[in-house]
Each structure stands twice: as structure tokens, then as C-alpha cells.
Image (cartoon, rainbow, N blue to C red):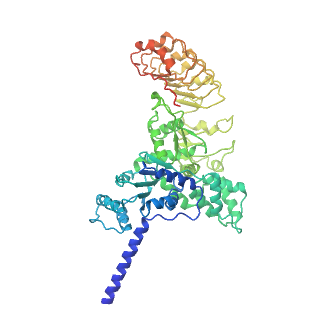
Amino acid sequence: MQVHSTRNGLRTLVNVNINLQKQRVLCTVRDPPDFTVGLDMPMKELKTLLLKEEVQLLLLTAPGGCGKTTLVQMLCQDDQIRGMFEGNILFVNVSKTPNVKVIVQNLLNYKNMQPNFQIQSDEDAINQLPQLLNHLTPNPILLILDDVWLGSESLLEKFKFDLPNYKILVTSRTAFPRFKFTYHLKPLDDVDAMTLFHRSASLHDENSYIPAEEDAKKIVRGCGGFPLVIKVIGGSLRRQHEVVWHSRLMKWSDGQFYFSSDTELLAHLQKSLEFSDDKVIIKECFMDLGSFPEDQRIPAAALIDMWAELYKLDEDGIHAIANLQELNIRNLASLMMARKDASEVKSYYNEDFVTQHDILRELAMHQSSQESIGQRSRLIINISGNNIPKWWTEQKQQLINARLLSISTGSKVEVLVLNFHTKNYTLPEFVEKMDKLKISDAFPNLMEINIDYCNDLEELPLGLCDIIHLKKISITNCHKLSALPKEIGKLVNLEVLRLRSCTDLSELPDSIRSLHKLSILDIADCLSIMKLPKHIGELCNLNELNMKGCLRLRTQFPESIMDLEQLKLVVCDEERARLWEPIKEFLPKLKHEYKRKEPQQK
């Protein structure tokens, strides 16, 4: 009995010791991989930012697979960082479902400390943190919270304490807006990406097949500079036969995704697409971005129109831009917004664009392709000339359920994305069969037209004036457009007319007087316009007029302008503002809300 008890006691001590060792390991920063590339400069920049006196909380953010944790591991091996923080570098992997009690207990065990009382709740755990931190001071402390997910921001606040030389470094796929100091880790450039690929695929090994340089570049280009993707794809080709290389290249060239052949890579990147039930629409918006051409800017206005149809969002774009902001914060897309005037903050998005990393676009397309072709809600097809995919001819009798197509067929289509890369292109015959699409036979149901940066547009077709359901026309940055159709007044339902930065446009047609529903008229930066239409006062519902940058508009306004009783906001520069001074008293709703041009910042 005594021997048995002794053996059990020894076993218990061994288990306790093993558990303590595990908990210490959990709070220790692992060594970086033996081979890293392209992270030396980011490490120096991150260190410089971290060591600034005013920085207590620093966020390191990038999409999954970009090397955030590896960069932190390199940082903690730096002599200056190790010398400054000595043994007070604490590493915590937060993950998707953080357990505060376990995190604090591990930290205490890491420093061989026992809590003052038994930890039974998250509140008890947080109350123990000062004990740990006071034990480590006055030496500097670096707490690393790795892999923090969206929704865990409140956890970060619990680890903040007003202590000298106490710093917190957070890594996350989410660019939390509340962080004052943020470092954005970028993907590898072409040279570093190729170096990592050669290493991962063992191309320096004499027994390995050496692909043609152009083939290797094609594969690396498809990896988008994501270190994880390069390592996984390179590793999958290591010491493979030449036939395997060519087979993979053919599959990828035919539109089969890297994710189709590697579940590890897909599983890692899919973590970024986990949304709560009330934010499922954000994931849908992410997948919609894959409908647009790669390496191109996506106009925010196009997404607003698309999502107004698909998800019944407001047509002003408030919810759509909010969704894009969330994708931007999650590092799933990049939103570039131009500076706006007061009148434009909630209504004008023609100068805003969205870009998406190639790998994230591939992920979006892969997510959209999981169902059979006939059942997909999105169909993304690249048609060269009139060549139709084989599956298309094989499924002529099968209904297509897609609501969004790049080009395809089906009666349920509500959004059509046409990616033209040629100067002349005829719409396919199948477009006539799209009953729900708001274009057919001279576009009778078309409600909005956006034309931006069309450099060779000199005039608009006369048929445009027959689309009487049009509510919005936006023609911007079309510098060769010199005149509008004289019969534009036939568009009696038009509510918004934007002609921004059409620098050759010299005048507005007199028939504009008939646009009695027009509420917004934007001629900003139309440098050639010298006068307003004589009967502009007949625009009885005009609310906003933007004439900022109309440098040649110097003559007195027509008398009828005093009849614009609904006019509330005029955006103009100081010279045009003087022309409004004698008119203000006749326009009671205008008050003093017009905006003078702000001086340029040097």
C-alpha cells in the first residue's frame, strides 16, 4: 500500500510539473522560422513605433497568412527588445473565443506566482492582473496579445493599466479603428515572394524539377505575396514530377483555385469569413467583390447600386458604405474615399473606390462556386469573344438561379456586371431574356446611369432622352464631353444630374428647365461653363447646386435664379460666392448654408 501511494504521489508531482511547463510555454514567444524573407524592414519599423514613449497600445494588422505572428517572433529576438524588456515579455494567444480566467492563470504560472484568491470568474482574473504587473515592475513589460478577433476589443481594455514602461502589442486580422497607433503589414514584393517560393519548393535541390522562369512567376504572382500561400503552394510542388507541375498550372489557368487543391490553406483563410448571424450580409458583400476584374478599382457607386437591388439597401449608399468600411476594417478589402464637401458626405461616392487583394478575390470566387452551376447565386464567367463555356451549351434547358452575373443567362438576373476589355462589344442575345434586369429594348426601366473616366466620350446618344424612367445621371471626369443632348428636358423624372469635372462642357441646354423633379445639380469643376441657363429658376425642386471650381462662371446669374425657392445649399468658391450675395435675401431656405472654397493646404 505504501509503495502504491508513493507511486501515485510521484505521478501527481510529475503531472503538476508537466502542466506548469505547458503553461510557461503558452506564455513564451516561440522562435521564428529558420528562414524568413521580406520582414527585416517591417521589423525595424514596428520596433521603432513600439519604442516610442507615447505608444502604450500598438496594433499589428494584416490579412491572414501575411506573417504577423512571425514578425512578432522576430521582434522578440531583437537584441534591443530583449535587453529592454529582459524576462518580461509575455505572449498570449487570444484566439476566437478567449478565456480570460485561463489567460491570467497562465500568466501567473509563467512567473511562478499564486493568485491571492481562487479565480472563479473573469472579474476575479482581471483583479489579479495588478498583482502580476506589480511583481514585474519597475522593469519594462511587453504584453503580446496574438490573434485577437473582431468582437474581442473589450478584452483589450481589461489589460490596460497606467504603469510606466508597460506596453501592449496586439496582432489581428482586423484593423480596429479605436487604435491610435497601427502598423499595417504588407504582402511580400515580387523579389521576396520568388525567393520564398524557391525555398519552399526546394528549387535549389538538384533532384527537383526546375520550371521555366515564366511558369514560376505565374505561380508566385497567383500567391499575391502572402507568405503562407507561397509556402503551402511551394511545398505542395516540392520534388514533384514535371507532369505534376504542368497539370497544376493548367488547372489554375482554367480558373480552378489554389484552394481546391489545398484544404490547409483554405481552412486558414476561411477564418476571416466567420461572421455573426446579424452580419451575414457582410460576407455576401465580400463575395460580390469577386464579380469584378482583378487588379482593378471597383467604383463604390457601382456597389451601392448593386446592393440596393440585391439586399434592398438604401439607394443613398449609407448602409453600403458602412458594409465596405467593415470589410476594410477586417482587411478583406481596401476602401479609398475622396475628401468630400459638406453636401456630399452622404450622397456622392463617384470618386470612391474599392480594391481587393488577388488572393482574397480568389477566396471570394471560391466561396461563390461551392454549389452546382445551376444553383449558384453568383455566376462569374469570363467570355472571350463569342466563345461560350462548354457547360453552358450542355445546360441550355436548366434554369440558372444566379441573381448576380458577370455574364450569363437566366430569368432571375437582377444585376449584370459587364467587364469590357475591347472598344466595341455587342450585348449577347441572352440579355433580352432577362426579365428582371432593368435593361432591355432601349432600356425602358433603367433608373440610373453612371459614366466615369470615359476619356473618349464626346457626346451622349440622343436615345438617352427617351429613357423617361431615369432618376439619376452621373457623368464625371469625361473631359471630352462638350455638350448634352438638347432634349434632355424630356427626362421628367430625373432627380440627380452630376456632370462633375467634364472640363470641355460649355453649357447646359435650355430644356433643362423642364426637369421639375431635379433636386441635385452638380457642375463642379466644369471649367468651360460660362453661364447658367436663362430659365434655371424653373427647377422648382432644386435643393442643392454645386458649382465649385467653375472658374469661367463670372457673369451675373439670370434673374430667374431668384425663383429657386427650395434651394438649401450652394457649394462654390469665394469668387462665385460673391455672385450669390445679392440673391440670398430672395431665397429664404438658402440662409447662409452655402460653402466657400477652403484654402488649399500646403
Tell me if residue 261 can be seen.
Answer: no
- Count how many numbered circles sit on residues in the image: 0
Is 600 drawn above or below residue 175 in the view shown?
above
Residue at point 31% right, 68% down? 114
Residue 529 lies left or right of residue 110; in this view the side is: right
Residue furthest top as drawn: 559
Tell me if residue 489 can be seen.
Answer: yes
Residue 585 lies left or right of residue 402; in this view the side is: left
Residue at point 54% right, 44% down? 289
From the viewer's side, name the closer residue of 542 and 200: 200
Percent coordinates x, y for residue 212 in the rendering: 73, 58
From the viewer's side, name the closer residue of 265 and 256: 265
From the viewer's side, name the closer residue of 77 and 521: 77
Residue 396 lies left or right of residue 98; in this view the side is: right
Residue furthest right as drawn: 212
Residue furthest left as drawn: 117
Percent coordinates x, y for residue 551 in the rendering: 56, 20
Percent coordinates x, y for residue 338 in the rendering: 52, 34
Quarter holding the N terminus?
A: bottom left
For residue 553, what is the image quadrant? Answer: top right
Percent coordinates x, y for residue 271 in the rendering: 48, 56
For residue 383, what is the image quadrant? Answer: top right
Is 555 drawn above or below residue 167 in the view shown?
above
